[in-house]
């Protein structure tokens, strides 16, 4: 684990917030990083990887047109936030649901774009969304996974109010586009 990642994870663990991270398609490295630094039990309520499409459908409650989409990332975040309320209903700490839905390099030719969508639900009626379109073929799977996982940690840092951020090694033409949307549920 890179030192900058370790430092940010230590800051997250020292900050009063509880999170459920749910990732499909990419983002499992962020979960590994969160759990790989001492203090994870102060931060992580749960981590989920509903990787198969049937598992994702079960988790979000509907069949999406596209699995790697903002719609799915936001539904994952809302489901995670709702679950955090059940698991930590007596907590005075901020409860955060984060969802990531991505399509990254694989061992076959992918017809669509390489992309990641990360959504964060902090329970204020809004979801903060982040979209990253990756330059297809410019990185291997590990490189894309690393970038998406760094984005996830940055999103958690922003949601908890931390000022620290990891460098995102974006290539020419790549950018993270952030926005806000209303939640569909009542989390």
Image: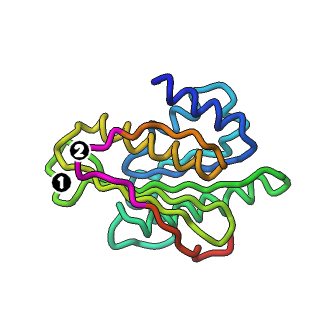
> How are the colours assigned in the image?
rainbow
Residue 170 part of the magenta-drawn span: yes
Mark 1: secondary structure: loop
Q: Nearer the viewer, residue 106 or 148?
A: 148
Instruction: Indicate whether 22 appears above or below 56.
Output: above
Residue at 75 percent across and 43 percent down: it is 16
In percent of width and height, residue 79 lies at 59, 63
* Quadrant of res 142: top left
Q: Is residue 101 visible?
A: yes
* Quadrant of res 162: top right
Q: Is residue 157 left or right of residue 168?
A: right
Please name the predominant secondary structure of the magenta segment in the image.
Answer: loop
Please report the bounds of the magenta region as a residue range.
169-177
Residue at 57 percent across and 45 percent down: it is 47
CA separation, marks 1 and 2? 7 Å
Residue at 55 percent across and 60 percent down: it is 77
Q: Is residue 125 left or right of residue 99?
A: right
Instruction: Indicate whether 128 appears above or below 1.
Output: below
Q: Are marks 1 and 2 in contact (CB under 8 Å)?
A: yes
In percent of width and height, residue 169 lies at 34, 38
Mark 2: secondary structure: loop
Disc 1: which residue: 110
Q: Is residue 129 left or right of residue 84?
A: left
Disc 2: which residue: 106
């Amino acid at each position: 684990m890179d030192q900058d990642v370790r430092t940010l994870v230590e800051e997250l663990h020292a900050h009063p917030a509880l999170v459920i991270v749910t990732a499909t398609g990419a983002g499992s490295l962020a979960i590994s990083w969160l759990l790989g630094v001492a203090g994870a039990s102060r931060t992580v309520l749960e981590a989920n990887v509903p990787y198969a499409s049937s598992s994702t459908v079960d988790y979000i409650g509907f069949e999406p047109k596209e699995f790697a989409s903002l719609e799915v990332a936001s539904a994952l975040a809302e489901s995670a936030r709702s679950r955090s309320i059940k698991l930590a209903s007596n907590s005075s700490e901020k409860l955060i649901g984060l969802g990531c839905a991505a399509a990254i390099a694989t061992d076959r030719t992918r017809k669509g774009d390489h992309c990641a969508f990360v959504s964060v639900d902090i329970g204020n009626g809004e979801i903060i969304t982040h979209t990253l379109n990756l330059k297809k073929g410019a990185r291997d799977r590990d490189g894309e996974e690393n970038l998406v996982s760094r984005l996830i940690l940055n999103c958690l840092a922003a949601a908890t109010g931390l000022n620290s951020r990891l460098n995102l090694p974006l290539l020419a033409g790549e950018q993270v586009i952030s926005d806000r949307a209303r939640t569909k549920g009542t989390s």
